[in-house]
C-alpha cells in the first residue's frame, strides 16, 4: 500500500509543477492568474477573463491524468461547469519539434501557443455570448422575444 501512496504523492507533485509552469507562461502573456495549488486537494490555477462582459469570470486549468484541461468557472473559488477543453502541451511540443527546430525554440513556441489558446478562448466566448444576446436568446437557448398567442392559460381553464 505504501508504494501506491508514494505514486499518488509523486503524481500530485508533478501536476503542481506542470501547473506552475503554465501559470508562469500565462502571467508572461499578460493574463491575471491566481494559484490554488497549495490550498486545495484538487490543485488548479484560475485565469481571470480579460473581458468583463462575459457571463463567467474565468477558467480553471487543471490536470486530469497526464493531460491538462480547462473549464469555465463563474468565480475564482467555485466549481467549474460546462465542457472541458484539452490544452495538449505535449502534442504542441512534438508538433514544433517535427518542424526540425531546436528544443529551446520549440519550447518558446509552446509558451506562445498556450497564451494564444487561452486568449482565443476568451475572445471566442465573448463573441458567442454577444451573438446569443443579439439573437434574442438567453444562455439556455430559450427565446426571450415572444410574439403570437399564449395558450398556456387556456389549457388550465378548459378543465
Image: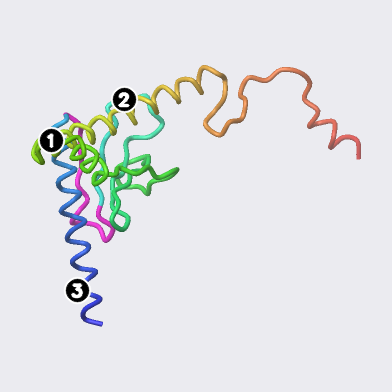
Q: Quadrant of residue 31?
A: top left
Residue drawn where x is 18% and y is 66% of the image: 10
Along the viewing direction, whichever of 48 and 105 lies nearer the viewer = 105
Residue at 45% in and 25% down? 129
Q: Earlier in the sequence, mark 1 or mark 3?
A: 3
Q: Relative to residue 21, is residue 114 drawn left or right?
A: right
| Nearer to us in this view, 41 or 64 | 64
Whole-percent x and y of residue 106?
A: 14, 37
> Compared with residue 12, is residue 63 higher up or lower down, i.e. above or below?
above
Q: Position of residue 24 (x, y in %)?
A: 13, 40
* In magenta segment, residue 104: no
Would residue 38 be counted in the magenta stretch? yes
Give neighbour class at mark 2: few <14, some 14-19, many 20+ (Cα, 10 Å).
some
Judging depth in this view, the residue of 5 and 77 nearest the camera is 5
The residue depicted at 78 percent of the width and 32 percent of the height is 152
Highlighted magenta segment, given as a residue range? 30-43
Which color mode does the image show? Answer: rainbow
Give the SS element for disc 2: loop
Q: Residues within 10 Å of mark 3 (few under 14, many from 20)?
A: few
- Earlier along the polypeptide chain: callout 2 or callout 1? 2
- The residue indicated by pointer 1 is 101
Task: Please give the name of the residue rendered at 20% of the width and 53% of the height, measured from the top-left corner.
Answer: 37
Residue 49: x and y, percent? 29, 31
Instruction: Name the residue tied to disc 2.
Output: 51
**Mark nearer the viewer, 2 or 1:** 1
Q: Earlier in the sequence, mark 2 or mark 3?
A: 3
> In the rendering, which numbered label is found on residue 6?
3
Amino acid at each position: 500500500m505504501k508504494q501506491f501512496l508514494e505514486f499518488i504523492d509523486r503524481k500530485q507533485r508533478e501536476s503542481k509543477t506542470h501547473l506552475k509552469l503554465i501559470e508562469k507562461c500565462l502571467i508572461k502573456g499578460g493574463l491575471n492568474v491566481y494559484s490554488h495549488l497549495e490550498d486545495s486537494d484538487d490543485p488548479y490555477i484560475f485565469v481571470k477573463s480579460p473581458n468583463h462582459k462575459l457571463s463567467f469570470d474565468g477558467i480553471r486549468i487543471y490536470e486530469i491524468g497526464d493531460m491538462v484541461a480547462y473549464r469555465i468557472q463563474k468565480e475564482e473559488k467555485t466549481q467549474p461547469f460546462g465542457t472541458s477543453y484539452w490544452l495538449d502541451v505535449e502534442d504542441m511540443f512534438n508538433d514544433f519539434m517535427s518542424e526540425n527546430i531546436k528544443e529551446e525554440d520549440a519550447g518558446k513556441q509552446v509558451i506562445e501557443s498556450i497564451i494564444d489558446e487561452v486568449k482565443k478562448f476568451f475572445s471566442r466566448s465573448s463573441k458567442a455570448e454577444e451573438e446569443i444576446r443579439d439573437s434574442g436568446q438567453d444562455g439556455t437557448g430559450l427565446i426571450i422575444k415572444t410574439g403570437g398567442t399564449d395558450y398556456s392559460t387556456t389549457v388550465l381553464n378548459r378543465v
